[in-house]
Amino acid sequence: MAEMNQAGKDLSFSFQNRWHETDDARRQEIMGFSEKYKRALDEGKT
């Protein structure tokens, strides 16, 4: 499980580095979705 969390962090980090500032709204939308998804995983709801 810890490895999956680390993979998710690495993925999030790579996403942050690839988005241009002009597309910040889209980046926030994707990051928000990934946060909700991680929370759902933590709660065992997926």
Image (cartoon, rainbow, N blue to C red):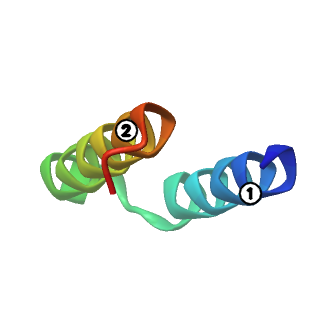
Q: Nearer the viewer, mark 2 or mark 1?
A: 1
Q: Residue at x 31, y 46 (%)?
A: 45
Cα distance between the residues tagged 2 and 1: 14 Å
Q: Residue at x 86, y 54 (%)?
A: 3
Residue 4: mark: 1
Q: Residue at x 51, y 52 (%)?
A: 16
Amino acid marked by disc 2: Glu
* Residue 5 on image: x %, y %: 71, 47
Q: Secondary structure at mark 2?
A: helix
Q: Quadrant of residue 4?
A: bottom right
Q: How many marks?
A: 2
Quadrant (top left/top right/bottom left/bottom right) for the C terminus: bottom left
* Residue 36 on image: x %, y %: 28, 39
Left or right: 12, with 4 as reference point: left
* Residue 20 on image: x %, y %: 37, 60
Q: Nearer the viewer, residue 45 or 35?
A: 45
Left or right: 36, with 6 as reference point: left
Q: Nearer the viewer, residue 20 or 45?
A: 45
In this view, which residue lies farthest toward the bottom?
18
- Residue under circle 2? 35
Residue 33: mark: none
